[in-house]
Image: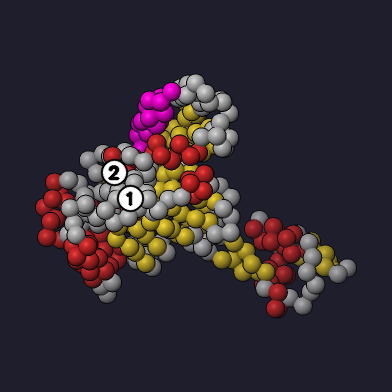
Amino acid sequence: MLQAEIKSLLKEDISILIKVPNSGKYYLCDCGEASLLTVKEVQSTSAIFISHTHIDHFSNFDGIFRYQIGSGEKVVICGPKNIHQQVEARLKSYTWNLIDEKAIAYEIREIVSKDEINIYALHPPHWNVELINTQDFLFEDEYVNVDFAILDHKTDSIAYLFKEKDSVSFNENISGFRKGKWISELKTAFENNDGDKEIEIEGTVYNAADLFHLLTRNTGYKLGVIMDHAAEENNYEKIRTVFGGADLVYIESFYKDTDQEFAKINYHSFASASGKIMNECQVKDAAPIHFSRRYTERDQEEIETAFYKAFRKN
């Protein structure tokens, strides 16, 4: 099951680390201040997902790449329109005369629309951005695929849904057979819907379909991160489409309900509005995040109370 940890303190800007258990694989959502983010976690991060590049979501990018340089790995960076230019500008603002060209590779994925993702390459020491190709999906690896919604924050703000891949488990207790390589062969046939595949067990040949009852498909966990967005219907329609039925969603709740006029002016959400849309999405669990720095701990408690009241309303 995917796990998320907020790496920024209450008075810091937002940064969330998503972990794939037992894999050492990390994904980072936004690059605000993150006092709780360790060097080891940064160096194990294979992909960074930027919602938008307001300073409170992007200010710590320099601190991230400082500890990734020298790894020799490829790191994927996903973000809104022009993210390739902004990353290039940050990297070019430093002098890199002592760095090897193979020290790291960045692949930038610019979200132009739901069906248009521009792929760019960036390499040291000159960091000249190069367009590689355009594709119609954002991100997939051996553990997750990532869907997204482009929300309005008076600029594009990308909300991300991490979908853990389904797994297939073997029900040993009802098998009656000794374990062997036939189990992996059966799982492959199950994944490919190849019921006619012949599986040999202890000298007897079976059709795979006759053994499928020994397997169980486990639906992958769905974890969402929704950052800054205006509390309005066009955004909510997109959120419902992507995040409906998710297991857990972290959603910005920048303002108290009593300050919702500020939310409207600044294209942010507020406590009960964020809770209400999570209720409408019928997510299993949700958590309010990313509160205005103006607020005290008591104010933040007020936000959480209003959020959960709206979220848990029957």
Would you say residue 272 is visible in this rendering? no
* Residue corresponding to mark 1: 14
Tell me whether the residue at label 2 lies in contact with that at label 1, contact meaning CB atoms closer than 8 angstroms: yes
| Residue farthest to the right, as pictured | 203
In percent of width and height, residue 75 lies at 51, 39
Q: Secondary structure at mark 2?
A: helix
Mark 2 or mark 1: name the one nearer the start of the chain.
1
* Residue corresponding to mark 2: 56
- Of residues 8 and 271, the one nearer the viewer is 8
- Of residues 106 and 197, the one nearer the viewer is 106
Q: Is residue 147 magenta?
A: no
Q: Is residue 81 magenta?
A: yes
Q: Residues within 10 Å of mark 1 (few under 14, many from 20)?
A: many
Span shown in magenta:
80-95
Classify 303 as above or below 46. Answer: below
Classify 110 as above or below 179. Answer: above
Residue drawn 80% across and 72% down?
A: 178
**Which amino acid is tagged 1?**
Ile
Q: Secondary structure at mark 1?
A: loop
Residue drawn 22% across and 40% down?
A: 154
* Residue 73 placement: quadrant: top right
Q: Quadrant of the C terminus?
A: bottom left
- Of residues 186 and 22, the one nearer the viewer is 22
Classify 92 as above or below 272. Answer: above
**Which amino acid is tagged 2?**
Asp
Classify 177 as above or below 290. Answer: below
Q: Which mark is residue 270?
A: none
Residue drawn 29% across and 50% down?
A: 12
In percent of width and height, residue 202 lies at 86, 69
